[in-house]
Amino acid sequence: MDTALKIMNLYVLSIFLASAQLFIVQPMFAKRLLPILGGTPSVWTTCMLFYQLVLLGGYTYAHLLSRQKNVRYQVATHLIVILAPLAVLAAGPPAWSPPNADHAVQWLLIYLLVSIGAPFFVLSTNAPLVQKWFSLKFSERGKSAYALYSASNAGSMLALLAYPFLIEPHLRLSEQYKLLQICYVAFVIVMVAIMFAIFKEGKKSADEGHDEAESPALSETSCAPLKRWSQRLGWVFLAFVPSSLLLSVTTYITSDIAPCPLLWVVPLALYLLTFIIAFAEKQIVSQKWLNVIYSVCLISLAVVFFWKAVALNFAFMFPLHLFTLFLAALLCHTRLAHSKPETTRLTEFYLCLSIGGALGGIFNTLIAPQIFKTLFEYPLGLLLSCAGLVNPSQPSEKSNWRFGGLLICVSLASVAVLFAVSSGLPSPWDDYRILVVLAPAAICSSFAIRQPFFMAACLAIVFFVGGKFWRPDFLFEQRNVFGTLAVAEVPEKTHVLIHGAIVHGAEIMDQGTAPEPLTYYHHDSPIGHIFNVFNQQWRAADVAVIGLGTGSLAAYGQPGQHWTFYEINPLVTKVALDPALFTYLLYMQGEKSIKIGDGRQSIGETRDKTLSLIVLDAFSSDSIPVHLLTREALQIYKNKLADGGLIVFHISSRAVDLTSVLRELAKDASLACLVEQTGGRKDKASSHKFASKWLVMAKDYKDIAVLQQRYTFVPPSAAPSASLWTDDFSNVFETLRFEGSL
């Protein structure tokens, strides 16, 4: 192997190492911060926003540094920059106290900046800067620096897949941090070797072509300022669309599952894979067939999006959403790859890509929740992705405005007529009615595959009509960082609280008396059995409930008891306190108070040994606030528990089974525990009584023995692979279940 080839491999290795570390840092620090800031989704979204902004800063630095004509000056400057984070990593993450709830976001951004900002910034500069140096050294050998972009994304994707499957299940957070330190040192060693080789060679003649204003190799567009700016805006747009779609799809498919690395890793890995394919030296996928496949996939998704019988089928819709994201990102990134400039403008190109990615994050994280009540940015991103259907290798076809206008008119007319005709169909036809009404617009969009603007217009009709007429008229609908919360009225004057696709409680209204608890909380459910025993033994008691929902549990309150509800989502509190929506709290017996904030932090402020009952009702929606299920969290609950008191966990879930995790925690804390699972009622009068699963713990078995004697509570079964969760270690993968039912 000659020296040049060895140096070339060093370039590839440095990019691979830097990119891999970027995607280990992200989930590692998000997980580290969850116990401090609570299980709010804003922890992850704020972390993502921070990473995107630092990445933009790194690409800007790389672009400005590469404009210096003297490469050895660039190397000397960058050597100082890459060595500085070693001190930060050696010091370790700071041990700061939890912030005030009003300043949590600012605290998080400052914490990330101090603890990981410097190394993350350096790692983010590596890909564009090293590719620039590579182009100066190896361009005469016919080697393209853009091929290294595939190595960069390969490193990112492998690290992304390794974290939930290899790193998280086997290494504690402290060990993960040591791994990061070792990897960064290895990265510095490789970079020093590259820099030494550059210094050894001296200043190359290639530096003469480094100034864009004098380079004869520049494309024609670089000499036309107006066209050059339009090209830059095109790069930003083509990077913005898949970035926004990535966040939209991730939010959509994880709105009812835990915001954990295992679940968002799949769409992000597919997103990175599209970069690898698009920027490969040889074209892997035919643009023509890619356009056709994506058009069919997009049209299909637009229709079934509103087909109730299919839209909630996770096994079918999950791959369809992911495949659509993959094709949309591949289309946009393929267009980017075809439009990439000469290597003299390489860092400028990557800077525009970074700006587009950051704008996608800003739009989805900060802007969309403020202007949209629902996840409207998702269909909007799908419509914008139609721009990727233009084939960059062929001259663009002139828009046929007559034909396009005709398609739009036919779509509107057919939808209006079919909607009017089908409105009289009986309710059993509701699921098929949407197919009949939306089919013409979908068919018209398929005729406009070669005219992306008109295809998007026809699909916009599908999304508008579907969203307008097949979404219920909610009594309440509002969105914040936790997602969209809605209250719908169903037959028999029943109000239902919905978050994503999950029902969080229901109440039959206008009874004029204290409402009967429904859904997971009815009298024949495990929690009903627990309160039958508890209320007989504790006439006066302090009760703490983490998770408010509709306030259904308040139906079990008794005179002389004082209940404190801890709720992290202010919208939930707003809904539960509105008597026009739910009246559980209105008719509650005993005293009550509500505290906004993370339950673990808030309950930790309670005096020790004062709570007779602690109920953790924060695990429906198939979500796992991991920080509520660790050894440290259980120790807090145990310290606050009065003698003879109970700790109860609601663990009904379609996607995860927390029984083994709680069994190990109870064993570690020397607590007795029992679990009961009951089915839902099938008769019409009890249609809102759901199957549920609850686990109860106590300091002494005699405090829960009566539950096993009267009802079907049993000791939880042991799982050989179950691990003990701590703030430093958890393995969500071991809790997954695939039955699809409780």
Image: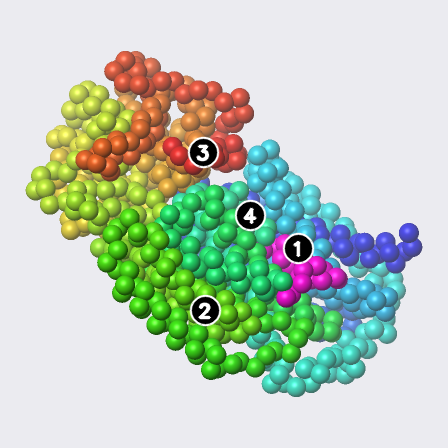
Q: Earlier in the sequence, mark 1 or mark 2?
A: 1
- Between the residue at mark 1 and the residue at mark 2, the CA separation in whole angstroms equals 37 Å
Tag 1 secondary structure: helix
Tag 3 secondary structure: loop
Residue ID for mark 4: 266
> In this rendering, would 292 be left or right of 493?
right
Residue ID for mark 3: 739
Which residue sits at x=43%, y=23%?
Answer: 663
The answer to whether marks 4 and 2 mark residues whose Cβ atoms lie closer than 8 Å is: no
Q: Earlier in the sequence, mark 1 or mark 3?
A: 1
Residue ID for mark 1: 153
> In this rendering, would 188 be left or right of 610?
right
Position of 229 relative to 659 (above/below): below
Say which amino acid is labelled 2.
Cys
Q: In the figure, residue 221 lies in which quadrant?
A: bottom right
Say which amino acid is labelled 3.
Glu
**Mark 3 Cα shell of 10 Å, populated few (<14), some (14-19), many (≥20):** few
- Between the residue at mark 4 and the residue at mark 3, the CA separation in whole angstroms equals 20 Å
Horizontal and vertical percent position of residue 675: 35, 23
Q: Which residues are magenta?
A: 271-288
Residue ID for mark 2: 444
Say which amino acid is labelled 4.
Val
Q: In the figure, residue 442 lies in which quadrant?
A: bottom left
Which residue sits at x=25%, y=24%?
Answer: 530
Horizontal and vertical percent position of residue 659: 42, 27
